[in-house]
Amino acid sequence: KAGVTQTPRYLIKTRGQQVTLSCSPISGHRSVSWYQQTPGQGLQFLFEYFSETQRNKGNFPGRFSGRQFSNSRSEMNVSTLELGDSALYLCASRPSLNTEAFFGQGTRLTVV
Amino acid sequence: AQSVAQPEDQVNVAEGNPLTVKCTYSVSGNPYLFWYVQYPNRGLQFLLKYITGDNLVKGSYGFEAEFNKSQTSFHLKKPSALVSDSALYFCAVRDYAGGGADGLTFGKGTHLIIQP
């Protein structure tokens, strides 16, 4: 079974631009969640989608948004990028809400 | 609110010796507890979980963890460390009261260094 796939792996953007990251979950997994990892703040929960509905959201500004499609693939968008948005963005999927999450390799976003 | 504490930034162990990586948690309800490992420039790999049942949980690569409700701890252990176990380890919690929809709350991580 293929794992969680995130694209692209690396991205460099300019401050003020917007970016879209993509995540394909493990086949059959209906839940997709997103996390931001930085050296200073560690791993922080962004949001989770289940069956195309956002189930929960972390403490991030409205510039961070996401969506999930009918095939469970998910995208995360960050608008008006700031230098502090530079991070490793991790996507995770799980088959149901009471199971462990399986993580992708992440997308390394650098804002210059 | 839920929280996780990993009190040690780094743990050094000689190869062949037993290792312990500490984790304590706080949730308002009952916890789902997890351990993940991260290698450089990689995502997180799932090691083991506690949902209900036996307090001693066995996971991947010979790791195990013991759930202690009275001490609100979930320490990761391995009887004999390997150099290849050197990595960054994260403990995470999810509050069962949220029906599983809450995001994971992670500890800050512990660097495990196994010396040959």
Image (cartoon, rainbow, N blue to C red):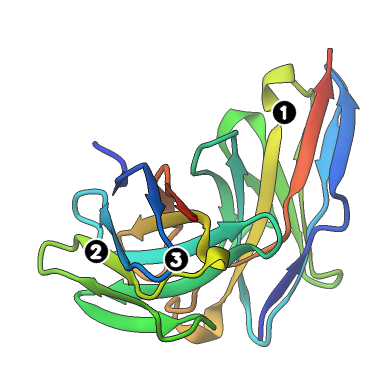
Q: Secondary structure at mark 1?
A: loop
User: Which is closer to the viewer, label 1 or label 3?
Assistant: 3
| Circle 3: residue type | Arg
Looking at the picture, tell me which residue is in the foreground, B29 or B54.
B29
The answer to whether tags 1 and 2 share a subunit is no
Q: Are there few (<14), some (14-19), or many (20+) residues within 10 Å of tag 2?
A: many
Q: Give the alpha-carbon distance from disc 1 to disc 2, as whole Å.
A: 32 Å
Q: Are there few (<14), some (14-19), or many (20+) residues within 10 Å of tag 1?
A: some
Relative to B23, residue B36 above or below: above
Looking at the picture, tell me which residue is in the foreground, B75 or A51.
A51
Q: Chain of mark 2?
A: A
Residue A74, label in figure: 2
Farthest residue, direction left? A70
Which residue is identified by label 3?
A15
User: Which is closer to the viewer, label 1 or label 2?
Assistant: 2
Which residue is identified by label 1?
B86
Residue B85 in percent (x, y) is at 69, 27
Could you tell me which residue is drawn at 69 percent across and 81 percent down?
A: B27
Could you tell me which residue is drawn at 87 percent across and 58 percent down?
A: B7
Residue A27 visible somewhere in the drawing: yes
Q: Secondary structure at mark 2?
A: strand
- Quadrant in the rendering for residue A93: bottom left
| Circle 2: residue type | Ser
Q: Quadrant of the N terminus of chain A?
A: top left
